[in-house]
Image: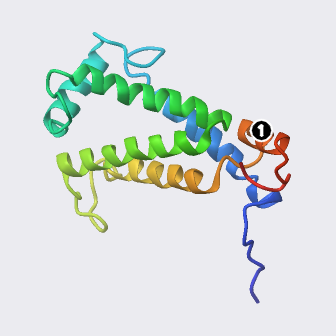
């Protein structure tokens, strides 16, 4: 016997998108607030540490580096902080998700460049998690929201429905 499979993310099948979208957005807000309550907390050990130990050694190919390291650090923080807010609200979900997907691809690159595969997929590491695992999962979540939209209970769906879109469509 096989259970019926949903072919679209509508109705009850879209319900899991809501807590996933909100939780992922809230977690990104936290990631984007290195060293304080908001993004780009210049002069804090966390912000400077990110710039010195992540951006300078692993992203030296970015335009203007190393002189523009604080700008790149701030862009990273604003992308994750602002993108997290937009994702949690379900507003401008696709552009926010695409931006967050880009930051997570950069995070995967950083972790692979700094620690390698760590024996993946069968290696056992001390912290029980490969360093690239978390940003890779985030990247896939953001890619899913980029292609599928915010789903129900979102600002995007309210706007879409007010413009005459079908109620069952994800924004």
Residue 159 falls in image quadrant:
top right
Per the image, the residue denoted by label 1 is: 159
Quadrant location of the N terminus?
Answer: bottom right
Is 110 or 122 nearer to us in this picture? 110
Residue at 63 percent across and 35 percent down: it is 88
Please tell me which residue is depicted at 58% across the width and 45% down the height of the picture: 94
Which residue is rendered at x = 86% and y = 52% of the image?
167
Q: Which residue is drawn at 60% across and 32% down?
A: 86
Give how far across and how far down residue 5 sits, in percent: 74, 76
Give left or right: position of 146 versus 48.
right
Nearest the viewer among 129 and 61 is 61
Q: Which residue lies furthest to the top in this view?
A: 43
Coordinates of residue 54 in the picture (x, y in percent)? 22, 33
Mark 1 neighbour density, 10 Å: few (under 14) some (14–19) many (20 or more): few
Disc 1 secondary structure class: helix
Relative depth, front residue between 129 and 139 = 139
Residue 163 at x, y percent in the picture = 82, 42
Residue found farthest to the bottom: 1
């Amino acid at each position: 016997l096989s259970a019926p499979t949903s072919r679209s993310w509508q109705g009850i099948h879209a319900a899991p998108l809501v807590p996933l979208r909100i939780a992922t957005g809230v977690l990104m807000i936290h990631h984007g607030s290195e060293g304080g309550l908001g993004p780009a907390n210049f002069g804090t050990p966390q912000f400077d540490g990110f710039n010195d130990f992540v951006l300078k050694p692993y992203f030296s190919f970015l335009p203007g580096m190393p002189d523009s390291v604080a700008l790149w650090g701030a862009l990273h923080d604003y992308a994750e902080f602002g993108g997290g807010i937009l994702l949690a609200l379900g507003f401008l979900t696709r552009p926010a998700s695409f931006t967050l997907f880009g930051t997570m691809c950069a995070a995967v690159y950083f972790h692979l460049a700094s620690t390698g595969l760590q024996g993946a997929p069968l290696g056992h590491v001390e912290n029980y998690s490969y360093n690239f695992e978390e940003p890779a999962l985030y990247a896939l979540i953001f890619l899913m929201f980029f292609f599928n939209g915010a789903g129900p209970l979102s600002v995007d769906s309210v706007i879409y429905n007010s413009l005459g879109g079908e109620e069952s469509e994800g924004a």
